Image (cartoon, rainbow, N blue to C red):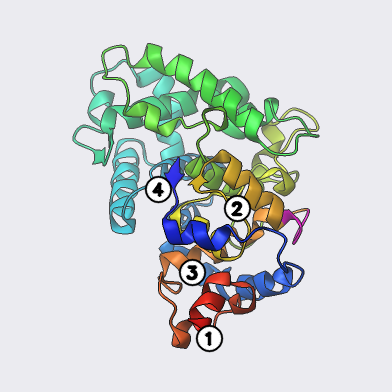
Amino acid sequence: MLEWGEFGFRCGALGLGESLSDLPMFLNQLHGTYHSPRYLESDPLEFVHRYSDPWDQEAVGLIAALLAYGRVAQIRRSVSDALSRMETAAGTPSAFVRGLPARHAEAGWRTTFEGWTHRFNRGGDLEVLLLLLADSWREHGSLGARFTRDLAPTATDFGPALDSLIGEWRGKSKALRPHQPTGSFDYFLTAPSGGSCCKRWCMFLRWMGRKDEIDPGLWTENGVLQKTFSPGRFLSPKQLVIPIDTHTGRLSSYLGLTARRTLDWKAAREVTEALRTCNPSDPVMYDFSLARLGILEVCTRTYRAEICGDCPLLPACRFARNGALS
């Protein structure tokens, strides 16, 4: 759970009811500017777009999303290194994953991620993650089929289904890492029931649950992997929850979408519900463009007329209004 800073809280504490009627227009303008493939290089989703095979995309998406913490340059190095090792060993990421159930006890395979690190995680953590993915493929046909098994078509959001998957993976992971220290692998397994905003899982599920020029939508009603799902099961865009981090949390506070001081699961749902008033069937469609404002440092923590004056969100931004009046 992320603690929000004093100024962000002060802006957000103004309340949610203050003139949001024009917000959809401002968000759509922002979406038109930044929701574009030309900005993919600033997002871990770029790795998914390097592959055309849907099982490659599912595997790469899971890796890229769960490693998306820390500095952008570090994330890119770690993901690139992991994928390079997999391709050297098996040709493609999906071929590597498919070979794991038969190979995971072999000493040669266990050297694939030797020396690999990404902040809190080590090569052994990545091994276990991919073994769990391989298990889902073997038992269900895809990770999406496993996930949507517990996603009720009438569910408001995917929270219960994510809790189910994380609970199952926590149990199975213990048998796969009996001699590994606990803690580092568990950093992959954040769950809504624990209060976490689950930013990385929300991001991965956005990629899987939306279909456009940015998001591949493999788990949607007409997604490529939906053929592996049980009848009537799929991930709908309206069931997604926004991936909230320091960037989207700060901007959500500026726009009055949340007044919560802690960026936790409740805050993520609160922001999503506020965005649902803008687009009931696809509330997180604005996530990629909102995040660009922070990631590309378009929106800073200081009011600057030369920047804020050209922002599509200016009329709805309380931070900018306060800055312009000070």
Q: Which residue is mark 1?
A: 309
Drawn side of residue 99 relative to residue 180, left or right: right
Drawn side of residue 70 relative to residue 101, left or right: left
Q: Are marks 3 and 1 in contact (CB under 8 Å)?
A: no
Mark nearer the N terminus (4 vs 3): 4
Q: Which residue is mark 4?
A: 68
Residue 11: % across, % down: 53, 63
Is the residue marked by circle 2 packed among few (<14), some (14-19), or many (20+) residues within 10 Å? many
Q: Which residue is mark 2?
A: 216
Q: Which residue is mark 3?
A: 293
**CA distance for labels 3 and 2:** 22 Å
Is the residue marked by circle 4 packed among few (<14), some (14-19), or many (20+) residues within 10 Å? many
Q: Residue at x 65, y 76 (%)?
A: 29
Dot 1: element: loop
Q: Residue 277 in magenta? A: yes
Mark nearest the camera among 4 and 3 is: 3
Residue furthest to the left in view is: 115
**CA distance for labels 2 and 4:** 18 Å
Residue 54: % across, % down: 57, 44
Give the main secondary structure, helix, strand or loop, of the magenta stretch. Answer: loop
